[in-house]
Amino acid sequence: MTAAGTATLPGVAAEAARAVPGVAGLQPRLAHRLAAAAAPARADTAPRRAPSEAGIRADRAPDGPGWHIEVRCVLAEGHRALDTARNVHDRVLTAVVSHLAAHGAAEPVTVAVTVTRVAARHGTP
């Protein structure tokens, strides 16, 4: 598999996870949040945003060939966490396996989904 193909795995996983109904966004890992907080203040007033893949971690499987994908997502209020997490798992797995196959690297993939919080709706009593 090409380096370009593996470099885009987090993006593929992030896009699949964000497309699931009930996912409000992806939660950056602590390292991303600390790095953003420690960064020098920018002169402009444009809001800083986490990279689109900040809630995704893609690592080679420690016990052999394949990939382990970790997804940290924030759910929208009113959605069942278990059902949404299962849907995220299935969609991310399908998207990553398809992406790897398209790049000639059919390898095993495991996906772990962590729901970090439920985002409350704004403007509702």
Image: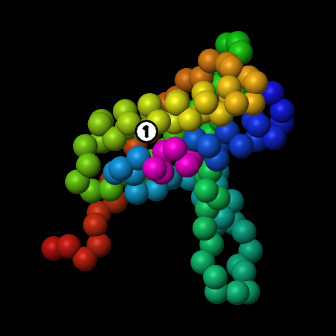
The quadrant the C terminus occupies is bottom left
Q: Is residue 28 magenta?
A: no
Horizontal side of residue 90 vs 52, given as left or right: left
User: Which residue in the rendered view is the most extreme toward the left?
Assistant: 125
Q: Nearer the viewer, residue 97 or 89?
A: 97
Pick the front one: 18 or 45: 18
Q: Is residue 33 above or below residue 91?
A: below
> In the rendered structure, which segment of residues is drawn in magenta?
14-19
Q: Name which residue lies at 70% across and 30% down.
A: 102
Return the residue nearer the eye: 59 or 1. 1
Going by the numbered disc 1, the residue's amino acid type is: Val
Disc 1 on helix, strand or loop? helix
Residue 13 placed where, x, y %? 58, 41
> Local crowd at mark 1 within 10 Å, few (<14), some, or many (≥20)?
many
Q: Is residue 111 visible?
A: yes
Q: Is residue 47 left or right of residue 40?
A: left
Give above or below for 2 relative to 117. Answer: above
Q: Which residue is mark 1?
A: 88
